[in-house]
Amino acid sequence: MNRPLPFDPIARAAQLWEERIGPSGTMAAVTGVMRVQQIIQSAVDGALKPHGLTFARYEALVLLTFAKRASLPMRVMGERLQLHPTSVTNIVDRLEKDGLVKRVPHPTDRRTTLVEITDDGRARREQATAAVTAIDFGLTGLTPRQTAQLTELLTKVRKATGDFTE
């Protein structure tokens, strides 16, 4: 990581934006979210790398762990992870290559393939979960109440853009 700057570059950009372009509130908020996303991504990647996982693969293992039968159709995985089918296929291919999931035929629908987490996949998910929770998923500096508020605010943005309808 680079040395900390002696000033907040986003606040400085907001000040200059305000002087030269106009209201800077949204620009500063979005720039802050984007920078925090970089910080979180770096922390989570660092925690997952020793376990041979990316965040997308980790999410897939967690999703399968949450499933009642520890398996889901690939289409459902894509919907729940909010990913394109090609991305789901790539994730499942890599997890299968590593022995963390396996593809199995659906018991009643020959057109559907299920993805099932293996015992090795469960163990890897447990290890990776310990690693990411030990670093609070990279989100540091907030109280539990502030974390809940942040989640609520981000959920409002996601809902307003049509991420979900609930």
Image (cartoon, rainbow, N blue to C red):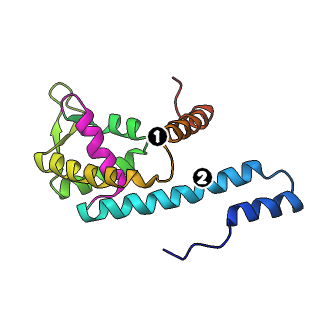
Residue at 51% x, 23% y is 166
Amino acid type, label 2:
Val
Q: Is residue 6 left or right of residue 140?
A: right
Q: Nearer the viewer, residue 130 or 105?
A: 130
Q: Is residue 92 left or right of residue 106?
A: right
Asked if 94 appears above or below 154 in the picture, the reply is below
Q: Quadrant of residue 70?
A: top left
Question: Can see residue 152?
Answer: yes
Crowd rating for badge 2 (residues with CA inside 10 Å; few <14, some 14–19, many 20+) = few
What residue would you read off at disc 1? 144
Asked if 128 appears above or below 157 in the picture, the reply is below
Main secondary structure of the magenta stretch: helix
Mark 1–mark 2 distance (CA, rounded to whole Å): 18 Å
Q: Secondary structure at mark 1?
A: helix
Query: Can you tell which of label 1 and label 2 is closer to the viewer?
Result: 1
Location of residue 22 in the rendering, given as x and y in whole percent from the top left corner: 87, 54
Asked if 67 appears above or below 19 in the picture, the reply is above
Question: Can see residue 89?
Answer: no
User: Is residue 7 shown in magenta?
Assistant: no
Residue at 57% x, 72% y is 4
For the view shown, which residue lies furthest in the bottom direction?
A: 3
Location of residue 158 in the rendering, given as x and y in whole percent from the top left corner: 57, 37
- What span is in magenta? 53-69
What residue would you read off at disc 2? 33
